[in-house]
Image (spheres, rainbow, N blue to C red):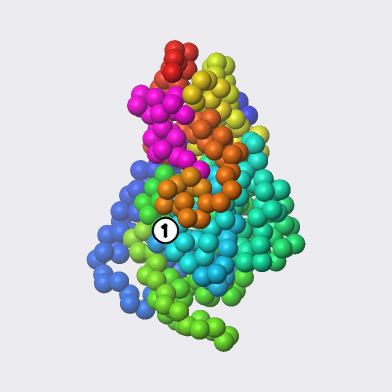
Amino acid sequence: MTPGDTRPAAPPDAAGVEEAVVADLARLLARMPDPAGSVHGAALERELAATTGVRHAVAVSSGTAALHTALRALHIGPGDEVLVSALSVIMSVAPIVHAGARPVFVDCDPTGTDLDYNDLARKVTPSAKALLPVYLWGRPGDPARLARMAMDHGLAVVEDACQAQGSRVGGRLAGTIGDVGCFSLKDGKVLSSGEGGYLLTDRDDIAQRARSFRSHQQPSPPENGRPAEVGYNYRLAEPLALIARANLARFHTLAARRRHQSCLLAELLTSTPGIDVTDVPARRGWNGYNFLATVALDEPRAFCEHLARRGVPNSVGTFGLIPADQRPALAPFTTAPCPHAAAVVDRTLAVVLTDHDDEQRLAGYAQTISREARQWRP
């Protein structure tokens, strides 16, 4: 991407890619699946590991399954605590509960780009076993600093990088800095297959236990004296693995397109009163997963809801995003409030972007946002 070029790039030979996928799917469906194993799933794992520079990739059925699998591969369960970002979605916290552990919510800094490390330090207890940072909107903060704090306290790091495919910090890809990184392949992600997920790790023991856990503990992992447990059916279906492989082959173009989309909205809205562009991907290694702006208008949350009704999809207005510690279902785990996370969510306009958003649609979003901001009377 050249510095002045914010036009969304079309995926290369998109029609050709679609034709190839359809042909491969036809061949796949023409024969019975091989009960001995997943051909495309295994190939996807090899290609993900090679692309990201890690020793192991383990494909699973969703991003939530990736997080649950990672936690259980680290033997985190009942009686354990996992420190998790309050600035997150419920899907990032549910796997902790599924594992039988207790989520402990950690506030973010006032900008929402990283954790509040003072709050984190206050909440570490002898029961804490892991840190689970969530890179909401694709922004990874400072995973290296988090890793140092984790080492000081003897904690594992499970990175929720589901929205951060392609984001980099200090030259390192998000999701490759902790003990294990977890990703989603759901539609809307930069790399997608409609549904699915995967985890990345350099640790042989985590990879071995994760592969067993995703398939009812078959083959059984060496437990070294630990009691055996029941696994799950978290396998990734072969047709989805095939689609993921096709998109992985053009990931650099898909990632560049997402950055272009975010940069274009930033350029179109830079001078809009009351809409302060938070960041653009060109300034750092952020993947531009959503266009982000700070709403400096009265009742910013109501404004985001208003935009959703006017056809601009966004995290707050369309999906009702609130900090995870404020979710009613997670109330039993909430102790101290996380005020920064609440403030960041309420004032952030995070426009949902997909590969289907062309220049005309994005220009329409910008026109609507600019017009409604100028006319806003809560």
| Front in this rendered view, residue 240 or 130 | 130
Q: Residue at x 36, y 24 (%)?
A: 310
The span shown in magenta is 301-323
Residue 102, x across and y down, in percent: 53, 62
Residue located farthest toward the left when viewing the structure as drawn: 30
Is 355 located above or below residue 124 in the figure?
above
Reply yes or no: does residue 303 show up in magenta: yes
Number of numbered tags placed on the structure image:
1
Task: Say few, some or many: other residues with alpha carbon within 10 Å of mark 1 (under 14 / 14 to 19 / 20 or more).
Answer: many
Q: Which SS type dominates the magenta stretch?
A: helix
Q: Residue at x 65, y 41 (%)?
A: 109
Reply yes or no: does residue 322 show up in magenta: yes
Asked if residue 378 lies left or right of residue 133, the reply is: left
Residue 44, x across and y down, in percent: 46, 62
Residue 341, x across and y down, in percent: 57, 40
Q: Is residue 280 visible?
A: yes
Asked if residue 70 lies left or right of residue 179, the reply is: left
Residue located farthest toward the bottom when viewing the structure as drawn: 225
Q: Residue at x 59, y 75 (%)?
A: 205
Quadrant of the rendering where the N terminus is positioned: top right
Is 170 located above or below residue 226 in the figure?
above
Asked if residue 335 lies left or right of residue 144, the reply is: left
Report the residue marked by disc 1.
Answer: 62
